Amino acid sequence: MVADDSMRKNNQMNRWHKLAAAAILTWAMTIGGPDVAQAQIKPEGELKFALYVTLPPAWLDPGEATPGVLSPFWVLYALHDALVKPMPGQRMAPSLAESWSESEDKLVYEFILRKGLKFHNGDPFTAEDVAFSFKRAKGAQLHERVKEVRIVDPHRVQFVLTEPWSDFMTFYGTLASAAGWIVPKAYTEKVGPDGFKKHPIGLGPYKFVSNKPGLELVMEANEDYWRKMPSIKRIVYQSIPESTTRLAALNRGEVDIAYLLEGELGKTVKNDSKLKLAFSGGIGTFFLDFLDMWDPKSPWADARVRKAASLAIDRKALSEADTLGASKPNGNVVLRSFEYALPIEPDPYDPAQAKKLLAEAGYPNGFDAGDLYPWPPYFSTGEAIGGYLGAVGIKTRLRTMERVAFYSALASKKLKGVCMCVDAVYGNASTRLSEIVPSTGTLAYGGFPDIDELYKRQLGETDPAKREKMLHEIQKTLHERTRFAPIYDYIWPSGIGPRVEEASLMKIDPYPWSAPLEDVRLKRP
């Protein structure tokens, strides 16, 4: 009888333990997402990415990231973390900050920081690191508009603005800048900027192991990452600029994910039963920027000529050829999903009307438009656009440049002719236009005085409805004047190898690459 009672008690206890374990797992999955059970297993294995660019050392340091340039976030999402950042299903998700608030007068933003977090070298994360990281971040607008960063206590920090600014959180909490991505103050001051780029220390899901500039970046899992333990032990970014070489490496099993396999290469992946075709991107809009339009002697100064160039492009055929039809033609450089965006239909493909407009402008036989600079590495797209322009009489010479040299020349206003540019600035309609529309924009070769004035006014407008009206007017006027020739919102194909369970592409939408990296998984035996 005693034995039976003991057995019953043991069975009841075991049942209680099972129910408790199930309840805990359910709770954990609720707060951590469906991958949490997988993530609690110790990281295993190695995954290799084939990148289409070389990774400059500057991308290892959030303080070196230029506002409006998305590429550094390739590395930042791995090694570093931000107070607030885009995450799956959230435009601005609390990360290193548990929460944030805005004062009634819209002059003070306060962030409550997570406690107990440590950098990869063991240094504690505090408000001092937040203030230090902001001070060294690039971005004139942020520093001009933030009067003071107050450290209230080790886990509470306030940003005090010079005047109300509706875009503070857009710049600080999205990928419009890297000002909210945090580095350790003590370590960074000790090793200096060059030392930091040689061995970066962050708060991200992966720790730096080694970097061979131009070849590969190796990282290992941070098992103490606050959100969840990464599934994969080691991640390697390999730079393979040549697309056919990336595909060959994927086929041989030398890499597991090969980015940017356009055109026929994408079709090859689609037809290979061992591989999986995946799409990502959606943040960058391709467009023609007429760099010489501000010169009254240039043919591009005539809006009819610019409209002719836009009508000459078959956007649908270009999307089919380059991205298997995934890229979406757009009549605006602002994504439709962005706040304050004005939906504008793309110009139709109408070469006959293009020739008619050229004749009306005084160029019945076309003209020599000089150089056409395609944004690296999209040289084949630039070549196709040059062909479309040539077919209506606009003759161009394709000029390809290495990525760093191109950025430098474009920003220093040294290019002449036409740029097949890409606008990938995150945020809303205002931030999207910030680099290319106001005459003071980093990449603007000129501007319209009335639009300059309207753009400046909307920056200080705190009424969302009034601000939307002003930004809609700006976008409408840009379209009417054919300031740009938008082409499409770029969504591109990549190849996924057979060992990959979860590539985490487009979990953050829009975003071009695998993220969050702690969600990426290999198939387990």
Image (tube, grey):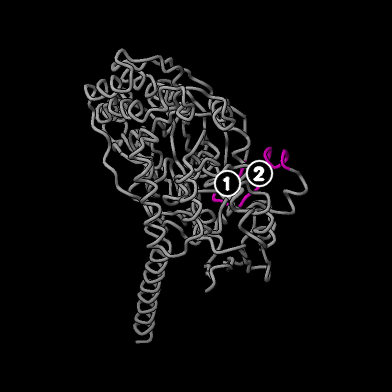
Q: Which mark is residue 337?
A: none
Residue 351 placement: quadrant: top left
Tell me the residue that label 1 is attached to.
79
Tell me the residue that label 2 is attached to.
200
Image x and y of residue 524, in percent: 39, 44
Q: Residue 251 or 448: which is nearer the viewer?
A: 448
Say whether disc 2 or disc 1 marks the residue closer to the N-terminus. Answer: 1
Magenta residues, as a range?
193-208
On screen, residue 364 versus residue 407, left or right, reads: left
Labelled pair 2, 1 in contact (Cβ < 8 Å): yes
Give the amino acid at mark 2.
Pro
On screen, residue 472 versus residue 371, left or right, reads: left
Residue farthest top in this picture: 365
Give the amino acid at mark 1.
Leu
Image x and y of residue 221, in percent: 55, 47
Residue farthest right in this picture: 190
Dot 2, crowdedness within 10 Å: few (<14), some or many (≥20)? many
Image x and y of residue 165, in percent: 53, 60
Dot 1, crowdedness within 10 Å: few (<14), some or many (≥20)? many
- Indicate yes or no whether the magenta region holds residue 409: no
Real-space CA distance between mark 2 and mark 1, rounded to the nearest whole angstrom: 8 Å
Is residue 81 among the parts visible in the rendering?
yes
On screen, residue 329 versus residue 57, left or right, reads: left
Residue 301 placement: quadrant: top left
Q: Residue 482 or 27: which is nearer the viewer?
A: 482
Residue 466 placement: quadrant: bottom left
Q: Residue at x 37, y 50 (%)?
A: 473
Where the C terminus falls, by quadrant?
top left
Where the N terminus falls, by quadrant?
bottom left
Is residue 497 among the parts visible in the rendering?
no
